[in-house]
Image: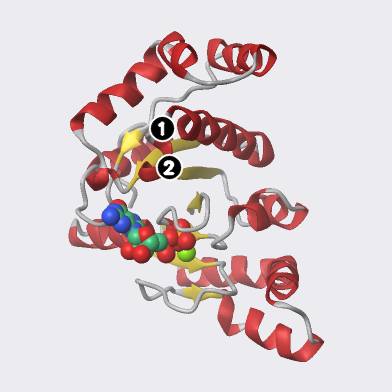
Amino acid sequence: MYTVFFVGTAGSGKSTLVSTLSTWMEDQGFDVGIVNLDPAVEYLPYVPDIDIRDRISARKIMKQFKLGPNASIIAAVDMIVTEAERIKEEMEIIGAPIYLIDTPGQMELFAFRQSGAYLVQKLSDVHTLVVYVADAVYAQSVDGFAVTMLLALSTRIRFKKPQILVINKSDLLSEDVRINILNWVEDPTTLLESIDLPPYEKEILRSVANMGGFIEPLFVSAKTSEGIDKLYYQLQLHYTGGEDVQ
Ligand code: GDP
Ligand code: MG
C-alpha cells in the first residue's frame, strides 16, 4: 500500500489536484484510492473512498461544543487522531495499491500540529510520499518563491518523508515566469540579487539556498491537466523505481 499526502497552503489546489490525478490514473487503468482528511471542507471535486467527514465534522463540533469556526476546525483535525487506526484498517480492507490523501485546507493545522505528523506516521506503510502543493500565483514573485521554498522545507522537516514539490495553477503562469522560477532554483544568486531583504535575512536565505533548500518544482495544473503525467511518473519513481503501481 502506497500513500501520497497532498499538503499545501489554503486554496493552493490540493483537493483539485487529487481529483485530476486520480481521474488521470483511473483513465490509464490504475486502481487508486482517495482519502479525505479535511473535516471542514464543504465541497469535494472527487468521490472519496474514505471521508473523515463521515466520522468527524467541524460543523457538528462547532455546535456541540459551542466553539468558533477556527477552534472547531483545530479540534476536528486533532480528533482525526482517534480515528487513525480505523482509517488504516479501512484502507487495508478496500485494498487499493495506492492512496491519494487530501489534507485539511489550511496547511498549518496539518503540517504544524502534532496530530498531522502522527497521522502521516500512522497511515504510512513502507512507501509514503508527500506532495507539497504550491500556488503558482503566489510563487511567481521573488518573495513568494522564497517563502514557498521555506514552507516546503518546514513540511519536509515536519513529516520526515520524501517530498515532491509541485507548482500548481501553472496555467496562470507565463513562459517568462516559469523561466524565472527555474533560474532561481538553478542559480539562487539571481533570486538573492533581486529580493528586497535586510542583510542578515538575506544571508540566512542564501545559506538555505546554497545547502540545496531550493527544490526544482514540477509545473502542474489541476485545471488543464498539464504535468499530471509527469507527477505520476515521479510518484512511480519513488515507489517502484519506475514500474507501474499495481
Ligand atoms: P485546497 O484548499 O488546497 O484543497 O484548494 P482547492 O482544490 O479547493 O482549490 C482552490 C481553488 O483553486 C478552487 O477555486 C480551484 O478551482 C482553483 N484551482 C485549483 N487548481 C487549479 C489550477 O490548476 N488552475 C487554476 N487556474 N485554478 C485552480
Ligand atoms: Mg481542499
Q: Is mark 1 within 8 Å of ligand 1?
A: no
Above/below status of 119 relative to 163: below
Q: Tag 2, which secondary structure?
A: helix
Residue 30: % across, % down: 27, 58
The residue shown at (44%, 27%) is 142
The residue shown at (77%, 52%) is 114
User: Which mark, by number, is residue 138?
Assistant: 2
In three-dimensional space, the C-alpha distance between marks 2 and 1, rounded to whole angstroms, equals 7 Å
Which residue ends up furthest to the right in the rendered image?
Answer: 65
Q: Quadrant of residue 176?
A: top left
In this view, the residue in front, 198 or 75, is 198
Does residue 19 appear anywhere in the picture? yes
Q: Circle 1: is it few (<14), some (14-19), or many (20+) Cα within 10 Å? A: some
Query: How was the colour assigned to the protein in this rendering?
Result: secondary structure
The residue that disc 1 covers is 141
Q: Specify whether 128 is left or right of 230.
A: right
Q: Are marks 2 and 1 in contact (CB under 8 Å)?
A: yes
Q: Specify whether 224 is left or right of 15.
A: left
Q: Tag 1, which secondary structure?
A: loop
